[in-house]
Image (cartoon, rainbow, N blue to C red):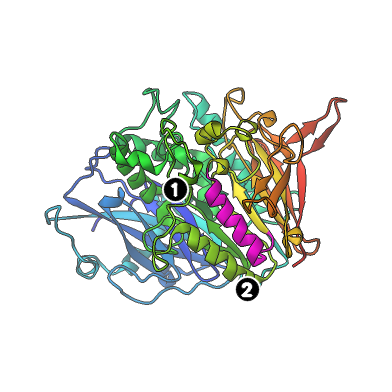
Amino acid sequence: MSSLREPHLGPIVGHTTDHSCRLWIRALDSGDRRGDLADDRRTIGVLAVMAEGGRDFAVAARPVFYFRLRREYDRTGTFNLGEDLSLGGQGEPFRLKPDTEYRVRMATMSTDDPLPNEEDLDAATLATRLPPPDVWRPEFDRPAMAADKCEAVFRTFKALTAPDNELSFLLGSCRYPGILFQEREADQIFTPMLSEAEGRDGRGPARFALMVGDQVYADLLNRLIPIGRADTFVEFQERYHAAWGSASMRKLLRHVPSYMILDDHEIEDNWSQDRVRREPGRGLYLHAIRAYLSYQWSHSPRTWYGPIYYTFECNGYPFFVLDTRTQRYTVSADDEDRDLSDNHLLGRPPLDPNEPTQLTRLLAWLTRQQQLVGTAPKFVVTPSVFVPNDVGTIKSDAKKLKDDSWPAYPETRRALLEHMVKGGIQNVVFLSGDIHCSNVAAMRFKGPGGAAALKAASITSSAFYWPFPFADGNPADYVHDSTDKRTPDTFKISKNGATAMDYTAWGFTQEDNFCRIDVDQARHRLVVHVFDWRGNRVQQEDLAGRRQDLISELDLAPW
């Protein structure tokens, strides 16, 4: 009988609840040659639960499970511990307890596959060709199953029906991979992220990390410059192997539940869906999305069948993670009309109410959460920045057409804000990345009814690593006050302007960073802490040379 092997990549701790945790690994078979996977070998994942609540299981009592690592997903796969049965429907799920720490080890094994590529072996039949999973219990103590290669540690979420008093989580985006010696620099920030997640300096632990786009860069320089640009599946695969295999990021992903969503650089700079209709965009998209599904989406929640946007909740607080990239439709800058009303960020409007789109699902979710959690914060993750806007887009639709954020999609923005105002959806908080300039913004509304009482906010954290601050992200490029005569940017929700949205933005920084967000129910506010790649607080310095920590407070309506 063959021995178990350590995973090639992972484990990654993915979507976590009060009773389950989705755990991901990738296998590497000796017959594989980069993207050319040996078609006569089938790979299986093996997971053992080593400890619960700080107490180790005896070797003879360890729960062990098989699961598939499919070639069509580049030998990756997940096991949803707490819900999934072992391969072939054997045994019972292992029941996880709320707010409890677990330690698991994961490994891979290979078996011969005599079937042609066009034929699949069903899980039940495959299970009969394997020894009982329990035979592998002692294998997880071998030196080859080292903790830094095979082990994941996570804590389940609390079992709550109403929002908890407090919640802390991490937010960040845009991990440029670096060139040559910069590859080490690109990995450094994930060490202090892990320390922050585990709790330090008197701060409690953060429950999870949100990575909101550009986790990999398919186009190293620019989509129009072929140097370092991914065009084949193997090249996309290489991007993920480099990112997921780097020491500090790998350790973070083994210990902290991570929620991810793509942005443009997982495909191509400023990507929009209309490029799929022409070559080489179609082939590029197929390679990129196959890699994304294997390496990011697979350990995310499965809220709907098909779409890659999803929802989840932690400590009673709801999150909707938007796909603002693969469903966006953008009018070409060469189009004579250049009518922004034909731009759609979350998919085209539905023609049939029985055919929901991402936007209609988002609006329905907001209404439902207002009913379920009342005025508690409702977090909307949008890789593209909601506010503040680029100064250059204020007076020019032509410049809006070239913009990558919400200003270029006024009808989508209007539909969302109109729904918030009419429905009295309180304390909506947008979480973004993308622009290589972290900041926070408070939004305010005017109009009939209770519009003036609504509170909404935006938090942007970017970038994990971006060595070219002179290229973009200058704070002066973004509106700080939408009512300032120099940068007027009031957004008319109603066509006559009777209902409108304004905002004030502050706390800008171009330093490589991640944010820690603390939800403080007692003071009904969010506290945003910004940390640099060393784990030190980012500081601001005024003209007099006075320095202070960049900590922002966003006041919300009481809940």
Residue located beneath label 1 in the image: 149
Name the spot of residue 420 as percent of width and height, x first.
Answer: 63, 61
Rendered location of residue 258, percent (x, y): 52, 53
71 or 356: which is nearer to us? 356
> Is 468 or 193 nearer to us in this picture?
468
Q: Is residue 327 above or below residue 85?
A: above
Inter-mark Cα distance, 2 to 1? 44 Å
When the figure is inspected, residue 553 is found, relative to residue 134, above or below; the finding is above
Q: What residue lies at 66% left-to-right and 49% top-to-bottom?
A: 458
Q: Which residue is mark 2?
A: 371
Magenta residues, start to end: 409-427
Q: Which secondary structure is most common in the magenta stretch?
A: helix
Question: Looking at this view, is 545 or 268 the one in front?
Answer: 268
Is residue 269 something that shows in the picture? Answer: yes
Residue 370 located within the stretch drawn in magenta: no
Q: Indicate the amino acid at tag 1.
A: Lys
The image shows residue 119, relative to residue 161, as above or below, that is: above
Quadrant of the rendered image containing residue 448: bottom right
Give the camera-side residue of 368 and 33.
368
Q: Nearer the viewer, mark 2 or mark 1?
A: 2
Classify mark 2: helix, strand or loop.
helix
Q: Amino acid at mark 2?
A: Gln
Q: Say which residue appears at 50% left-offset and 42% top-offset.
A: 340
- Element at badge 1? helix
Callout 2 touching callout 1 (CB < 8 Å): no
Residue neighbourhood size for the residue with mark 2, other residues' Cα within 10 Å, grouped as few (<14), some (14–19), many (≥20): few
Residue 164 relative to residue 274: left or right: right
